[in-house]
Image (cartoon, helix red, strand yellow):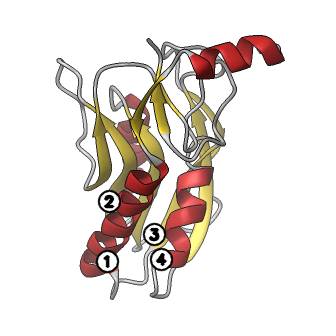
Amino acid sequence: MPNFAEAQGILNSSDILFTAAEVDAAVDRMAADITAKLGSDYPLVLSVMGGAVVFTGQLLPRLVFPLDFDYVHVSRYGDKTHGGELVWRTAPKEDVRDRVVLVLDDILDEGHTMAAIRDKVMEMGAKACYSGVFANKLIAKEKPIAADFVGIDVPDRYVFGYGMDVRGIWRNLPAIHALK
């Protein structure tokens, strides 16, 4: 974990890719898309902790239809900037059997985490599993899953803010930044 001066240095040397207003508009659009597709399905929404907490907290009040809420905690990053082994900390507590499930995460990077969550949810008997990510990273290699709902596309850079961290910090930023 960086000290205060290092944390400020990371932020001060970063590029802003999306402003807070652009982030807010993307979440509004996602809410409309999700409502159009799942608004009559009474879905179970699963938020992926901890990155999706900011995004989920902003999105849920915009989904004006009945839903159940739970979370999963799966990680490949920890405080690192590159993905590692998939670690399940918390599986869904709610019964997903015969449910339409919407999994929300902060970013679809290489797609391994979301694909593993989808596979687990379907193994548990879900009727359908949709994925919504605030940010979809545009990478050169093929991903094992494509998100059904996407807020913004980001370049293949290390991005942070709006739930996404850099070295464990700056999840609380309202805009999207990228390391130089």
Label ID, residue 97 = 3
Badge 1 amino acid: Leu
Asked whether the beta carbons under mark 4 and mark 2 sit within 8 Å of each other, the answer is no
The span from disc 4 to disc 1 (Cα, nearest Å) is: 13 Å
Name the quarter where the C terminus is drawn: top left
| Element marked by disc 3 | loop
Locate residue 28, reporting x and y percent. Answer: 38, 68
Q: Residue at x 33, y 32 (%)?
A: 111
Q: Residues within 10 Å of mark 3 (few under 14, many from 20)?
A: some
Q: Can residue 17 be seen in this view?
A: yes
Badge 2 amino acid: Tyr
Q: Which residue is drawn at 53% across and 54% down?
A: 55
Asked whether the beta carbons under mark 3 and mark 4 sit within 8 Å of each other, the answer is no
Badge 3 amino acid: Arg
Label ID, residue 38 = 1
Residue bearing mark 4: 62
| Element marked by disc 1 | helix
Sequence-first tag of 4 and 2? 4
The span from disc 2 to disc 3 (Cα, nearest Å) is: 14 Å
| Element marked by disc 2 | strand
- Kindly indicate the quadrant of the structure image that contains residue 107: top left
The span from disc 3 to disc 4 (Cα, nearest Å) is: 26 Å
